[in-house]
Each structure stands twice: as C-alpha cells, then as structure tokens.
Amino acid sequence: MKLGGQAIALSPQPLAALLPDNKAALTGRNQPLSPNNIAQNQISNYAGCTTVQTAGDLGQPQFQLTLNGKTVTQLGSGKVQILSPSQLQVAEVTVDSGIARTGSSTDNSRLTPLPKGTRAAIAGRDGDWLRLDYGGWINSKETRIIPGAVPPRTIIRSIGYRQSPEKTEVIFPLQVPIPISVKQGDKDFVLTLYNTTAQTDTFRTDENPIISRLDWQQVNPNQVQYIFNLKQNHQWGYKLRYEGTSLVLTLRHPPDFSTKKQKPLSGIKILLDPGHGGKESGARGADGTLEKDVNLAVSKLLRNELIQRGATVVMSREDDRELSLPDRQKLIDTEEPNISLSVHYNSLPDDGDAEKTQGVGMFWYHPQAHSLASFLHNYIVAKLKRPTYGVFWNNLALTRPASSPSILMELGL
Ligand SMILES: [Zn+2]
C-alpha cells in the first residue's frame, strides 16, 4: 500500500473470531464464532502499520496486489489527513443532548450525552464523525466549529448548592463548558469533568436530604471526579445542563412514601407510554391483532388501577396516533414523573428457541431503573404465572431518559 510517498507492506492477518450481532443477546446465541469454524477461504484480511511524523494531507492510499505475476492496483475510497496538534479546531455541541459514542459509527456504544454548549478540541475525524479530545466521538451535525478557539481547558474552585423540596441542584462554576461523564452506582453518583484542573480549597457541605457526603479528587492531570455518597441505595433521576459556563447537576429527591396517606400512591406521578401508534403498528399477533392497540388498551386499564390507588398518571398517548421516540423522551424530561413505564407486547427475533424466547421481559439502562425492572419482572411472572423472558440492560429510546427511573416492559406471551 502506498500512502504519502511511503510504501507499507501488508501481511495476511491471523484469523479472528467473529462476533454475532447485538440482537443475538435476546435469543441467548451470542457466543463468538471461533476462527477454527470459519472456512479458510472466507478470510482474506491483510494489514500493516506505519507512523507519520508531520501533519498534512496524505491523499488517497493506493493498494497494489501481485499474484501469479499479475499486478492490480486500486485507490482507497477515503483520504488520510494528519491533524497538527497545535492547530486543532474546537467544536461546540449545539443540540440539547449531544450523542457521544465510543467510535465513529452508530454501531459504537453511547457514552454520557454531552450537554448543549460543551466545547472540546477535535483530535480526529472520520467522515461526518469527530473524535473529541476527551475520547468520545460525536456526529458533526450536532456541533459547530468555534473559529480561532484554542483547545478548551478550565480550572474549578468551589461548587454551589440550590435546594427545593423536590430536588438538589449542584452548580460547578467553570471557565468554559467541558465534556463530562456520569457513573451511577447503588449508593453513589460519580461525575467526571474532563480537561479540568482543580484549584479547590473549600466548599460547603450542609445537611442534605439525599447526599450524605461529597468527595472529590483530581484522578489524573485532565480529570476531576466528584463522588456523591448518597443516603439511600435508590436514585430517582438526574439532569445535567450548562447555564452559561456553569454545569448544573440536578439530583431528584425520593417521592413521599409515608404510610399515613389516605391512598398508597397519593403524591406519586407515573408516566405510562403505550408503545407505537398510528402508522407505527408494532408487532402483529397470529390473528392479526396489532401491538399498538394492545399497548393502548392495557395502558388504560393500568392507568385506572393506578388512579384508584391515588397516583397521578400521565399518558404519552390516549388514542391511536403516531408519536416519535424523541417526543416520548421529551415528555418524560418535562413531566418528571417518579417512574416511567413504556408498555409493549413482544416482537422477538425469529431465530430463537421458541421455548426460551417468550414471556415477560423488562428492559432498563440506567442503574437507577434496575431494581424497578427486576421487581416488576419477578412480580408479574409470579402473580400471573407467566413465562419469563428475562431482565435486560438495553440501550433503548425509552430506557435512556435519566430524569426519572425509566423502563420498557415487553408483556407478551
Ligand atoms: Zn413494541
């Protein structure tokens, strides 16, 4: 292969195992296909390595293959450009929740979303995708370039609190909005600020309804980590946003569970999201019954039961209409229910074992939603004597909202 005046030898690569599609986890057939089981003639992967010292445009790579005295050449489909570390462009996130990923395609896993206003240097590009200096990738459509900006870094000194009966807001005053990530545990909430250097001497730690203590450390020269040690091992939702250059973390307080109430669910707000609707009919049963209709009918029955027990119920739809996934997510974020349940009736991959791929399934994404998913799964299976499909961590549009514990239920047979 020729690239920018260099010739790079490509050698045949040892066989690697093949990983099945992500959907294979839903049927339990997710083990790798070992190289021994792959026919030798299926694999023809050649690769080589080189380093390039100077920045600049290296153009298209040219591939050349000589076989039985015959030589063929072909140009690669992309161009290679080495970015200069001293002239990195700076991107700013222009959407409410920028989707950060582990690589340059939607096949790559999601990282903590980047709040609107986040700024970071672009350390690499792949087509439409930008690799930001902290490690995450983002689609350039969710960003704009800040002309002439140098790679953003900030110091942090103190932090501040705002508290209401429903929530605690923690404010991190920064010089510029930098990338962040969140790790939620059973009894802690860990917030990492990238490209940040601490100059902290003191901050206030008054009595708080949910936080028992806040610890922090500079984990490496680029990252400051805040560990919120919590009083209870259940979390009730959080939000992250930039107000100017200050990062605002909202931690929701638990709802009122006092037993003195007239009705057990008084003061509890529950959002029910009947899946699909309108042209989006979802799965189709053997007799032609449409999933969207069952979802709505069951959600209405559930609503009546919840209201009788004193709950306030918000429905994402009450008739047969189309509703986008982002609109459903937005409703959760604005209504801020205490829990959010998306109601579905299974449509499972066809290639599974018919005995095992049936029954009640619960899907969760943020740790704060796990105990709810697991409880409802076990309760419904035991009470209604239904087969179990299982409890799954799953990156779904209706499990991703972080503002309240959000789960998706697959209630089919
Ligand atoms: Zn569905």
Image (cartoon, helix red, strand yellow):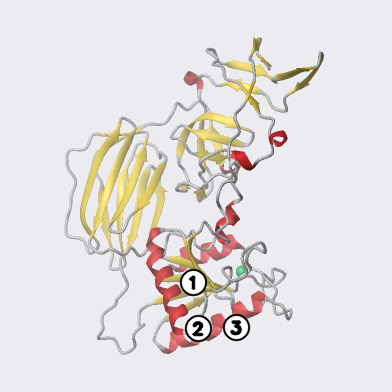
Q: Looking at the rendering, which quadrant does residue 268 occupy? A: bottom left
Q: Secondary structure at mark 2?
A: helix
Q: Which residue is mark 1?
A: 341
Q: Are marks 1 and 2 in contact (CB under 8 Å)?
A: yes
Amino acid residing under circle 3 = Ala
User: Does the beta carbon at disc 2 come under 8 Å from ligand 1?
Assistant: no
Could you tell me residue 77's position as x and y percent? Answer: 73, 28
The alpha-carbon separation of the residues under discs 1 and 3 comes to 15 Å
Amino acid residing under circle 2 = Leu
In this view, 60 is above or below 349: above
Q: Looking at the rendering, which quadrant does residue 413 occupy? A: bottom right
Q: Which residue is mark 2?
A: 302
> Ligand 1 sits in which quadrant?
bottom right
Give the number of the disc on residue 40: none
For label 2, the crowd category at 10 Å Cα-Cα, with few meaning under 14, some 14 to 19 and many 20 or more, is: some
Could you tell me residue 200's position as x and y percent? Answer: 21, 38
Q: Which residue is mark 3?
A: 297
For label 1, the crowd category at 10 Å Cα-Cα, with few meaning under 14, some 14 to 19 and many 20 or more, is: many
| Disc with the residue nearer the chain's start (2 vs 3) | 3
Judged left or right of residue 250, residue 228 is left
The alpha-carbon separation of the residues under discs 1 and 2 comes to 11 Å
Q: Residue furthest right?
A: 70
In this view, 174 is above or below 386: above
The alpha-carbon separation of the residues under discs 2 and 3 comes to 9 Å
Front residue of 226 and 28: 28
Front residue of 319 and 225: 225
Q: What is the number of callouts on the image?
A: 3
Judged left or right of residue 362, residue 126 is right
Q: Report the residue at 31% width, 56% height from top.
A: 169
User: Which quarter of the rendered picture does the N terminus lie within?
Assistant: top right
Front residue of 298 and 284: 284
Could you tell me residue 373's position as x and y percent? Answer: 43, 69
